[in-house]
Image: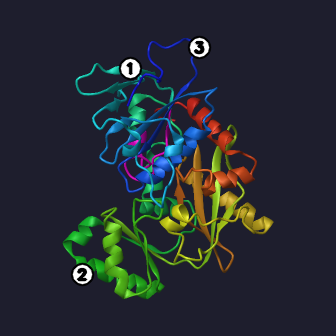
Amino acid sequence: MSTENLPQSPEQPSRKPRVAVVFGGRSSEHGISVVTAGAVLRAIDRTKYEVLPIGITQDGRWALTADEPERMAITDRRTPSVEDLTDSGEGGVVLPVDPANREVVYSEPGSVPKALGEVDVVFPVLHGPYGEDGTLQGLLELSGVPYVGSGVLSSAVGQDKEYMKRVFTSFGLRVGPYMVIRPREWQQDESAARKRIIDFAGEHGWPLFVKPARAGSSIGITKVDDLSGLDEAIAEAQRHDPKIIVEAAVRGREIECGVLEFEDGPRASVPAEIPPPDTHAYYDFEAKYIDSTPGIVPAPLTPEQTAEVQRLAVEAFEAASCEGLVRADFFLTEDGDFVINEINTMPGFTPISMYPQMWQASGVTYAELVDRLIQAALHRPTGLR
């Protein structure tokens, strides 16, 4: 990747803040992260910020990528990759782990490393493990570089569905019935682990949802209607995470709510409803991203229901000590109660994703949303806070 058009050191005294948009990554949500990055790159105000796109390949290499958002879209039902956006398979980007030095360096074998200048803030749009789960946030804390979104602990809690539910329960938020099968338990006695799931189904009924405990975008999830589909569902979840979570079906409407941090604290957006998709068994990966099943914004709720789900969304944000942004997902049960399903600390962030749509309906445009998140990160210190 040529560095000719990128900002070079030495720095100009009056330069604009430099935003590194980091995307891709090693998780199974790599392609969706690239799509999200394209939307963010398109929205960043180039008169206000300098932008440095950094992609993490599927094998973990940090690469300098083209600043070409139009190439970061889903095409022919295929998600893009970081590898599609790099000219060189050997060059790499290095962010020094030194709070006194935020300078990013690009190097290729046989060439003199090139300084690309200091990064003022990172906008990490990675989804899933090795990015959204606190790992990247820990690196940025060590580097002393401000970043958009939640910190290490909140990101980890938001990624692990088991501990997320444990935190919510401890704060009095209602969650649906679930159980967890850890990798050691499965390795030591598959039959006993499987029997636990069958007993769980006997108590709560079919269908069950078998999920990777630390994945998102509905990847690796299977709706299991009876015993015959259980083994295949377990194998599919374990392809993405050796730890799996099994959830009982919660009968109710799917309601989502966005939370955004303002100067006076977190506020909730108008909520949205995800109607049951016509051509899918549930709101799975293809329904979300390939077929773009539309949500209803705002959700057709009573004023009391709207106020309640907004209150609970902010409560979930605070319970997990989140920062910046969160999308909180709920079920509105037939008895009128809200059951929280999960939060996403870096939700899908394309203009057609539910989080930006909810804020658009709340009076915050996509470009304003991106700018507010960057500004909040620039003014938030790293370290203990």
Q: Which mark is residue 191?
A: 2
Dominant secondary structure, magenta? loop
Q: Calculate the distance from the C-alpha at mark 3 to the C-alpha at mark 1.
A: 18 Å
Say few, some or many: other residues with alpha carbon within 10 Å of mark 1 (under 14 / 14 to 19 / 20 or more).
Answer: some
Residue named by callout 1: 115
The answer to whether 204 is drawn above or below residue 47 in the figure is: below
Q: Kindly report the distance in space between the C-alpha atoms of the residues bearing marks 2 and 3.
A: 65 Å
- Amino acid at dot 1: Ala
In the depicted view, which residue is nearer to us: 282 or 161?
Answer: 282
Locate residue 277, reporting x and y percent. Answer: 59, 74
Q: Tell whether 367 sits left or right of 139.
A: right
Q: Are marks 2 and 3 in contact (CB under 8 Å)?
A: no
- Residue sitting at 42 percent across and 70 percent down? 221
Give the magenta range. Answer: 122-137
* Residue 200 occupies quadrant: bottom left
Q: Earlier in the sequence, mark 3 or mark 1?
A: 3
Q: Decide: few, some or many residues near mark 3? Use Cα within 10 Å; few <14, some 14-19, many ≥20.
A: few
- Considering every residue shown, the one lying at the far front of the view is 76
- Dot label at residue 218: none
